[in-house]
Amino acid sequence: MLICEDESNLRELVRASLGPDYRFVEAGTVAEAEEALRVAAPDIVLLDLMLPGGSGIDVLHAVRRLPGDRIPVAVVSAWTTPEYRTAADEAGADAFMAKPFVPDELAELVTRLLP
Amino acid sequence: MTVRRPTTIAFRVLLGSAVLAIVITVALTALVLAVSSLRHAITAEARAKDTLTSALRLQTATGELQSSLRGYLLTSGKRFQAPWVLALRQIEPAERDLDVRVAGDPALRSRVRALEAEIETYVSDYARPLIALVQQQPEIGRSRTASDEGKRWSDQLRRRFNGLAASENARTADRAAAVRRASSIATGAAIAALVFSGVLITAIGALGARALSRRLRHAAAAASEIAGGEFSTRLPEAGPAELVELGRAFNTMAGALDASRQTLLEQNRQLEETERRKTELITIVSHELRTPLSGLIGFTNLLLARDFDEATHRRYLSIVHEESRRLSALVDRFLDVGRVEDEAFELQLDPVDLAQLLREQSELMLAESTRHTLVLGFPDGPLRVMADRERLAQVIGNLLTNAVKYSPDGGPVEVVVRDRGDTLRVEVVDHGLGIVDEDQPQIFTKFFRGRAAERGIPGTGLGLAVAREIVEAHGGEIGFTSRPGEGTTFWIELTRAPVAAPVA
């Protein structure tokens, strides 16, 4: 699972919420995220919209451009206005979870999205 | 002092009226004179008539005198004595009457006296002696009637009377002609004056009033245009003095209206701008608060819902603690919105060790970002400034946070202190995005965020505005240099503290 989030505490929160059954790859910037996509080939991406170096939407586009099977992407963001939700949707997000989130709900979402 | 002839409407109207008044006065005077001389003429004519009538009466009386004398002679003194006496008695009153009539005229008076003397001579030197003679010798009477002397007297008297009448008539004719001439001239002058007045009045009315009316209508139209929103309308400042004044006053007013409208539009624009930014701020604030809140809610939820070992438990609790403090710091920073507006910014000034403060803040910064490295450059010796430690820490913290935020790909952040004698200069240098030229003038504006929102960089747009207020309240200066794509250097300059003071 690729976690794209610039706050280290929140990355830790995601790890803690989802438990030890997953292998985590972390990225704090758009550049790191794109690098990780190439190198680590994640099965699922959790994506914040506010990333240094660009926008989470750019990462989303990058994910959608990858060859192969479609990787599920869940956007996890504090920016919950309709415009952002629509933008995420149009860029190809599979789900949108607002921050602050309940850890169990995030875990459930991930389970649902993974094949 | 030079006296310029005023070109005012008032002057022109006054001038026209004066000319008109003079012309009319002249005309009326001429008419009055004509009437007066006519009256004189009438009076003189009446008097002349009376004189002639009186002279005629005297003539008649002398005629009767002569014929009764002749009758007396013819009848040899037998008859006509009574008529003679009657006739003689009528002479004196007639003469007296004539004397009265010609009393005011010397020429006439001398003629009349001569005439009366002649009559007197006739009576005393001719008539009476003759009568006396006939009374003594009646038979002589008849022969004397055919004598030349009687005829001579008769002709003489007649000549005198005719001369008197002729001269009187001639004078009357002369007077009549003079009066006719005078009245023609007066009438002509009056008519000319009236025609001229008519032309003058028409000219004033037609030209003056119309021109004035046109200018006034023009002014009214211009006022309507301005009322309709067309503020560039102006009146010509030319012509008579009153219209120049009107034009100038109007144009000044229009100019002032235009200027104040521009000012209001500008103020409105600025208010709208501030409003917009405030709305943006509220949105940003609510989102930024969610980040530490996510940590708080998430970790406390985990801690309550699941079991963890002691170490992990402690770790998560410390994160909760950290996020709570960050939330608190955020709230404080957002509360500064109000304080930025508030002029009464109270500072507690003490000597502060700048080096220590900078190191502290830099460590905090490093804790927030693993991608950045810190480079410190301090000169030797004590670096002390007079400052409010908390506020200064806030400013340094803000500059460092910005340095990190605006170099998202990581890199070095330099913190350098320069000794400037009386002041110390702190520079915070990043090698990140830089600030584009268009944004540079607005960097310290409240709520200004430039390109930050596009790039996903969080912030309120208040940090630098607050920082500037704080630095300037210290009597210091704040500034920056930047090149897009290469990085930014923010600097602050503060007065050194006196060396001997104890350190805060």
Image (cartoon, coloured by chain):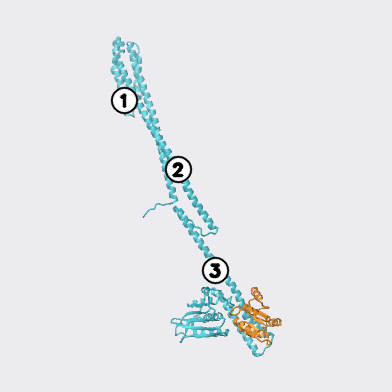
Chain colours: A orange, B cyan
- Residue B321 location, quadrant: bottom right
Percent coordinates x, y for residue B352 in the rendering: 49, 83
Disc 2 secondary structure class: helix
Task: Give the alpha-carbon distance from disc 3 to disc 1, as whole Å.
Answer: 116 Å
Dot placed on the residue nearer the N-terminal end, 3 or 1: 1
Residue at the outermost bottom position: B310
Foreground disc of the pair 3, 1: 3
Percent coordinates x, y for residue B206 in the rendering: 48, 46
Q: Which residue is mark 1?
A: B111
Disc 1 secondary structure class: helix
- Name the mark on residue B199: 2
- Residue B94 location, quadrant: top left
Task: Give the alpha-carbon distance from disc 2 to disc 1, as whole Å.
Answer: 56 Å
Task: Give the alpha-carbon distance from disc 3 to disc 2, as whole Å.
Answer: 64 Å
Q: What kind of residue is marked 3?
A: Gln
Foreground disc of the pair 2, 1: 2
